[in-house]
Image: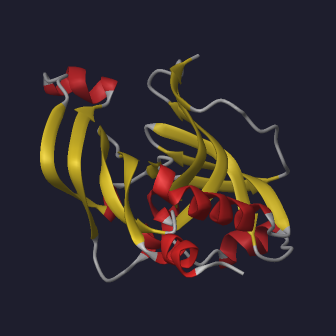
Amino acid sequence: MLGPSRREGLSAKTSVRVEFYTRNYHVSGDVEISRWRLADVLNDRSSPFVVMENAVREPLPGFAEAGGTDLARATQVLQIGKASVLFALPHEAPEQDAARKAYLSALHSERALISAVAIVPPFEVRGTAHLRRPYRLRQALEELPAEFIPLTQVEAIYLLDPRLRVVAELAVTNRSAAELFGLSGETALSSQRGFSPS
C-alpha cells in the first residue's frame, strides 16, 4: 500500500520537459502533466492547445533553409496547437520517476504488444503499440479510441534526411495527423535514446 506522500506524487501535476515535433518545428518546454501521462494531456478535448513555459523552438532543417531562418528562439510562455503536433516525447523527471515507472509498467502489462508505424511527414515514427485486449489487427486499428496514441521503444526518422533520428523510451503519436498508420507483428526494440545522426 502506498503512503499518502507517495500517492500524492503519483497523482499531482508536475512540470515535465516535453519535446514536440510539428511539420516545421522542434519545440521543447515545461508542461504540467499528471502521473507522466502526456497522452491524457493531448487527448483532453477541453482545450485545443498545450501551454508550455521556458520554451525553445527551432525550425527543422528543410524548413530552416526554405524560410531563411535557422536560429533557435526562446519564449517564456508558448502555446502549441494539438492538431499541429505530429509526436511528442516526455523527458524523465526525478519527481515523476515513480509515476513514469508505473505508467510504463502498466503499458507493458497489456496483453497485446504490436509493432506500429505512423507516416507523419516529414517523419516516420516506429514503435510498439499497447492494446488492452487481444485484437485482430484490422479490428485494433478501427477501434483505437484516442487521437494521440502512446508508443514505446520509439524511433522517428526525419524523411528529408534519414540520417537524423529521434530515439525515445516513449512517444505520443498523433494518429489524425498521420498520412498512414499501420500495425503489424513485433519488431526488435532499440535501446538507444535521444536525437542522433545515424
Residue drawn 29% across and 39% down?
Answer: 25
Residue 113 image position (x, y, % from top left) = 81, 59
User: Which of 9 and 131 lies nearest the eye of the viewer?
Assistant: 9
Residue drawn 21% across and 47% down?
Answer: 54
Residue 69 image position (x, y, % from top left) = 14, 24
Side of 40 where 168 appears, left or right: right
Residue 23 image position (x, y, % from top left) = 34, 43
Rendered position, 38 above or below 157: below
User: Which of 5 and 48 lies nearest the eye of the viewer?
Assistant: 5
Residue 178 appears in view: no
Rendered position, 78 above or below 139: above
Rendered position, 124 above or below 177: above
Residue 32 appears in view: yes
User: Which of 136 and 74 lies nearest the eye of the viewer?
Assistant: 74
Residue drawn 75% across and 69% down?
Answer: 131
**Quarter of the figure with the C terminus:** top right
**Quarter of the figure with the N terminus:** bottom right
